[in-house]
Amino acid sequence: MDNPLLKPFDTAPFSAIEPSHFLPAIKNGISLAKKEIDAIVSNTEEPSFTNTIEALTYADELLSRLTSLFFNLNSAETNDEIQKIAQEISPLLAEFSNDIALNLDLFKKIEAVYKQREQLQLNPEQYTLLEKHYKSFSRNGANLPEGKKEKLRDIDKELSTLKLKFGENVLAETNTFEMLLTKASDLAGLPDGAKEAAKAMAEAKNKEGWLITLDYPSYIPFITYADNRKLRKQLALAFGSRGFNNDDLDNQDIVLSIANLRHERAQLLGYTSHAHYILEERMAKTPDNVFLFLNEILEKAKPAAKREFKQLENFAKELDGIDQLQKWDSAYYSEKLKQKLFNLNDEKLKPYFKLENVIDGVFIIASKLFGLRFEKTNEIDTYHEEVLTYKVTDLEGNFISLFYADFHPRPGKRNGAWMTSYKSQMHKDNTNIRPHVSIVCNFTKPTPSKPSLLTFNEVTTLFHEFGHALHGMLADTTYPDLSGTNVYWDFVELPSQVMENWCYEKEALELFAKHYETGEVIPMELIRKIKESSTFMEGMATLRQLSFGLLDMSWHGQDPSEIKSVKEHEKSVFADTSLYPDVAENCMSTAFSHIFQGGYSAGYYSYKWAEVLDADAFEYFKENGIFNSDIAHKFKAHVLSRGGTEDPMILYKRFRGQEPKPEALLKRAGLIK
């Protein structure tokens, strides 16, 4: 077979790739990696850092590239064929991963190097790499007796398949639901742009009327602005019941199976729970620390959240005679109250946030802070015509990275926003191999009469994902395993969340927030209102985020075998954080992709954890100027470029000169004075 994935390539040869190319290519990648591993094991020389640790680091270089390509496509441009192949590939990769982790001869060589680590004169990065490899073996069953190793293999294979199935079910339920409206009166309250988009969506499917879906750019405007409460309820019930419909796409048994298998795996490896296993390699270290952290913020946020909810209840009653606020009322009345208090809404702001201008803005800010230039190019192959590509250089013209950006929803693309990589940065053979980085979002599409105009939330999302991208693009480490976003998961959100802060600053907004028709810079009055409203309903938003973290820990911080009903378990966990009445038809866990499909199991708290870091870090900028070159250089030198080469707290203190203080977050959120 003429397989483009089996030929050398630098940029991904997307247009030449057929789904059928992946399975043979990945099998070949596994085979090559196994040969590299065999060579390490059969080497008769004394085990050394070079012939064992470095050799192992580069052993699966090709396989890593192929799998990142495949799973990125499975997220951003999937189809039935790719999903079917994913079901074949995932168990193969789980088996290969276990072949390495459970290879006792290989582990003995790593252990021999590890035991003499203090005599080897390793630099901090080499020391971290050695420790990472040693722990990845000791933490993943290298010391287990043979029978337990087999059990571990079976669990990992089953988990890989279940996680895929979970994600496929959520995507299928998202794509299946359509709410076709045929009366213009049903769209009352909706902004013109949202109506136009709904019309275009219907036309694209040869339907008369307006089509509303569960994709965020369709769902969010409707749930926020539509006056028709019954239709908001219908949409909210559909969104909240994904994976919870007792049909072929139901995820309840999958959730229970994943939670129990993870617990069984942790116990097999000698840990109390999956959370104990995961958190050993996080800044938080233990479940107790996570609970302490979440409950400390909960204590500060809950009184504020209750006050805000009461205010919202009174407002809805006064405005529309609503006696009992429901979940499908939350965004609608919050938006109405926000307009009343601040005279500010997305429709006033959107004309100043044309997508192309926001992209230019984030590039200008990256240039001012980190000395980067972005040059659009049409010469890079992409997987879809909507994907934009840029060549990134420094101010001297040195190549830094390739940058891909994919901004709009379409069938076959999962909801949400994420950053990913197609090629890792590393120093190898006296060459600094530069990364290929991508961000994927689901922003409002252009319509026949308007360009893509972003909500303010979409603007902050773009800055967030671009912060992750900077972490990847500015990486400058020797080893790919420690490069870019290969850091502790409760540190990975710092670069992304800190970037969001520039969206609220006059000095930054004036660089790019210009009216798409007149070119007028965003008025000072609107900037002031953005700032003032930034803590609006922050108590409720914090409570919601904490509830997700607590739900995650409830699945992973204890033995889940006693949990028989996903819904009942969830209700009991939410009892302390819920403000709205429970909705019997809805369930969060069955569509909680972050923890049951993505990498955030026992790690969802890290969004809040990183907020403490980002508030503290941005306070440093604010004290000295948001474009202060010395502080930007420190952030680049000690955080963005260093990846996971050292303990994150060491890197953070090198940048900041001190440990982060939670007060900065609580103050910014308006939860303390």
Image: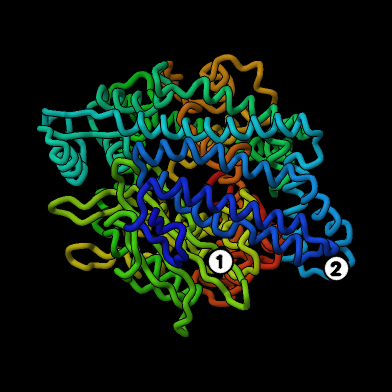
In the rendered structure, the answer to whether residue 54 lies left or right of residue 241 reads: right
Looking at the image, the residue that sits furthest to the front is: 1
Q: Position of residue 179 (x, y in %)?
A: 23, 28
- The structure residue drawn at horizontal position 42% and vertical position 19%, both measured from the top left corner, is 583
Visible residue check, residue 411: yes
Image: 77 above or below 519: above
Q: Nearer the viewer, residue 185 or 235?
A: 235
Mark 2, Cα crowd under 10 Å, few <14 / some 14-19 / many 20+, is some
Nearer the N terminus, badge 2 or badge 1?
A: 2
Q: Nearer the viewer, residue 120 or 656?
A: 120
The residue singled out by tag 2 in the image is 120
The quadrant where residue 211 appears: top left
The residue singled out by tag 1 in the image is 425
- The structure residue drawn at horizontal position 19% and vertical position 43%, both measured from the top left corner, is 197
Image: 352 above or below 265: below
In the rendered structure, the answer to whether residue 410 lies left or right of residue 251 reads: left
Q: Nearer the viewer, residue 283 or 18?
A: 18
